[in-house]
Amino acid sequence: MQRATDALLIDNVAPPFAVLRRIRELVSELEGERREIEPIEHHLAAASSTGVRAAAEAWRGLVDGVETFDFDMWMLARKLVADTFSRIVVYPSGFDPESNDGSIDLILIAKRDSKRILRVDRRTGEWRSTEELNHFDKQNSDPPRPGR
């Protein structure tokens, strides 16, 4: 559409009326299609966030049971991990083992293709940082390796 408009603007001659009418029709159709798509996109976004909220509530409910070593809660936590993540990569000495900063790095690869790095203090278990990973492509699904 943009190329056709640009081509018409290059000429100093007025474009044929039929071409202008067809452009207006196409623009009108495009706007109509966008109006039809918008509620579907909102519905899709709401549906996907509902699943995320439900999973977050399930995780919160498990914390006490897992910390007290309740076997049923422990097994449910294992199932949630399997249902949520396609892969978990653990770097016990962090990404850069030579730095010896006392952290454990984890890469969590969700089944919905989001990737997150967690950095945890090795001795206390305290959360140090979290980072969304968007910089390694889908073709190469391998996470980064230490020292790279």
Image: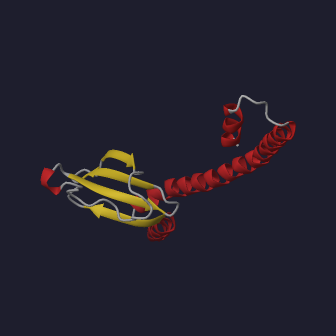
Question: Quarter-wise, where is residue 2 in the image?
Answer: top right
Residue 5 rendering spot, x and y as whole percentages: 70, 37
Compared with 115, 31 (above or below) is above
119 and 133: which is toward the camera: 133
In the picture, measured across the screen, residue 97 lies left or right of residue 79, that is left
User: Residue at 86% of width from left, 39% of height from top?
Assistant: 21
Q: Where's the N terminus, which quadrant?
A: top right
Q: In screen coordinates, is 138 left or right of 121?
A: right
33, 14: nearer the viewer: 14
Residue that extends furthest to the top in the rendered view of this protein:
12
Q: Identify the coloring.
A: secondary structure
Q: Residue at x 42, y 58 (%)?
A: 137
Numbered marks: total: 0
Q: Locate the C terminus by quadrant.
A: bottom left
Q: Quadrant of residue 28?
A: top right
Q: Is residue 86 above or below residue 57?
A: below
- The image shows residue 72 at horizontal and vertical percentages of 48, 70
Could you tell me residue 65's position as x and y percent?
Answer: 45, 61
> As rendered, which of 101 and 11 lies closer to the eye?
11
Near-viewer residue (68 or 121):
121
Quadrant of the rendered structure where residue 144 is? bottom left
Picture coordinates of residue 135 (x, y %)?
39, 51
